Image (tube, rainbow, N blue to C red):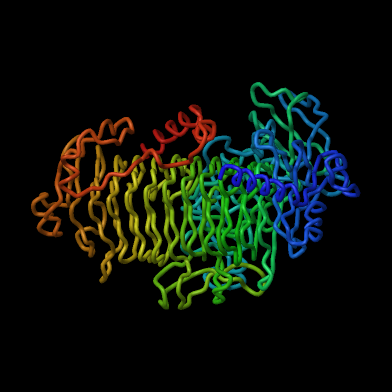
Amino acid sequence: MKNLLISIMLLGTSVVCAQKTVHLAPEGHDSWSGSKNRPFKTLERAFAESVNTSGDTLYIQVASGEYRLDKTIKLSDCVKSPVVVCGDEKNKPRFMGGIRIKGWEKYKGNVYRAYIPEVKLYDFSFEQFYVNGKRAIWARTPNKDWYFVKGHKEYAYVSGIRSANYATQRLELEQRDMESLKGLSSEELSDVRFRFYHKWDITQKPLSYACPDSGYIYIQGGGMKPWNPITKGSRYIMYGYKSALDMAGEWYLDKSEGYVYYIPREGEDMNTAECIVPTLHQWMVVEGAKDNPVRNIKFENISFQYSAFRMPKNGSEPMQAAATVEAAMELSHVENIDFINCEMQHTGGYAVWFREACMNNRVEHCYMADLGAGGVKIGEPVYTEDSTLVSRHNRVNNSIITHAGSELPCGVGVAIFHASDNEVTHNEIADLRYSGVSVGWVWGYNNSKCLWTNVLMEDGTVDFIQTELVSPAVRNLVAYNHIHHIGWGELSDMGAVYTLGESHGTRIVNNIIHDVLSYDYGGWGLYTDEGSTGVEMSSNLVYRCKSGGFHQHYGKENRIENNIFAFGHYYQVQYTRPEEHLSFHFRHNIILQEKGETLAGAWEKGKVDMDYNLYWHLNGTPEFGKRSFKEWKQFKGEKHSVIADPLFTDAVNDDYRFSSLKNLRKIRFKKWDYSKVGVYGSEEWKNKAKMSDDLLKEFKEISSVRLKK
């Protein structure tokens, strides 16, 4: 038997060695043979060898080093066989979508500058700039927080479906907040951009006209959305112009002169600093055909870095979750495409987007950090009646998605649109400005005349349509993720896990969620919104969320069971809209509080199946409207629910293990193992998922300010 096993192993080795292998190196050349001594230079040239493999696997061995991407890598039906692209695990090759900026000179005071010939030669401009791997700040005013809109008026010229297709807005601002615009020439004023924060969205617009002395500005483009307009009290910043350059870490590009200006941060030496300007919007596009998908490609141990985002000429209109913003990696009509132990860093938009008809693809053990929008998108945010275009059975597993929303704060860690049967498991999703995971993309109930979703218009834009349809976002799984420190007090109406529309069979289970901080309302842990139906949210540990651990806006027949909801600031759990049908089951949950309302909203009026819940207040007694607990139990049928200490080991210091199970048995609570949540593998990998002490301290300081308001 031993000899037989040895023979099989040798046979396996000989088969692997017989596969076609080509090599890639930074010093290679595409006219060479692709051997180890005469390697290729580009991935496109290496992939072309797949036509010569007779269907066997093509191995592309990528040497460590830096590969500058002059253009987007495009793969299509030219890939004729399985391909494995592999770099060194410890020293990953870097594919860079940017150029280095050198030749810095002292300009005035603490300002340095460098000349970039491409700016004038090729009319090249950019909107992101990095120093030593850290995103610099495009010169802005104010340097911290924001100003507030004083008044608004819109003039609509071309009507649209839910808002004008073209309109102008006159916004009244405080005159003192426009000091940095006074005295600027018309050319200098044309550089000025505005970012408006309103509820869960942002609007970014170039300045059309300004009257700094009177406090008025004019912007133009699409009409304001009736559900989320810019109004009195909306926040804004101004950015992208030279007179705003006044703080360490800020930069400005003078397109007329070709110079980039920068004020170094403490410890940065501009003689030795690595300064990168992104030049490519996308690193790679993989596009198969409906009847001929691209199949069986694995990228392993590869680092992709630096992609660009540029605001459209007429500005960025508000779009929830930055749903239509491009990703640095975009794939359509693909099957079995894997990214294993890869890096995607310093993006302008999202990192990865599995678009139409993407089946059985994986993002596994990947590190996605410093993201302009979010991490991974699955499916399209525009509806189609062709079910074959719905993406299915994709997996994001054991990955780190962190520090997102730098360019578009409404980006999401993982967004699942019109897609089914996908899995988001064992990930670390942290340090985002908006929701951690979003599932579904319809507003309302299936086959309802009141249902809204997005469609692609004839001119290529995306707009809303009200129609009867069935949401394809079903049976998605969000499990064993650690989602925390999101919101940062910038946007409102967010959830660490957010569901939208009917999502039958979708399960949100065994996640740890904490530290959700919205600007105003709506910083929830679990959030069933806009007709969410058939969703299970069970065995989740949720704590320290500004607006509570759970909220249902409206929906039906969801199961909220066996969760721990602890230490919500304003509320513990919230329920907004009562309807004629059963809204949700709420059973076997533990609610632990030290402040705020226990049950906020429509709990008395709505139809909720409640029982076997445990309530405990560290500083008093849980409140049930104007009723005593005994009266409440009779009123809602919670005859087995109790007020009792859950007997955690030390919940105040985030230790939610149980010192005793005696009170859990009263509500039939089922223990589960918190230690299995988040990324797994080496200690080095798990430590990489941890936020720095400085970031944790900063979040705590911001929380102390936002929670006082």
Taking the image as drawn, is residue 493 in sight? no
Residue 353 locus on image (x, y percent): 61, 56
Residue at 53 percent across and 54 percent down: it is: 395
Q: Establish if 28 lies above or below 154.
A: above
Q: Establish if 102 lies above or below 67.
A: above
Residue 628 locus on image (x, y percent): 10, 49
Residue at 23 percent across and 65 percent down: it is: 607
Residue 208 locus on image (x, y percent): 67, 55
Q: Establish if 191 lies above or below 292.
A: above
- Total numbered circles: 0
Residue at 69 percent across and 50 percent down: it is: 84
Residue at 54 percent across and 62 percent down: it is: 224
Q: Establish if 331 lies above or below 274.
A: below
Q: Which of 243 and 49 lies nearest the eye of the viewer?
A: 49
Q: Is residue 231 left or right of residue 87?
A: left
- In what quadrant of the picture does the N terminus appear? top right
Q: Residue furthest right?
A: 31
Taking the image as drawn, is residue 339 in sight? yes
Q: Is residue 284 left or right of residue 501?
A: right
Residue 139 locus on image (x, y percent): 66, 38
Q: Which of 34 and 630 lies nearest the eye of the viewer?
A: 34
User: Residue 250 sits in which quadrant?
Assistant: top right
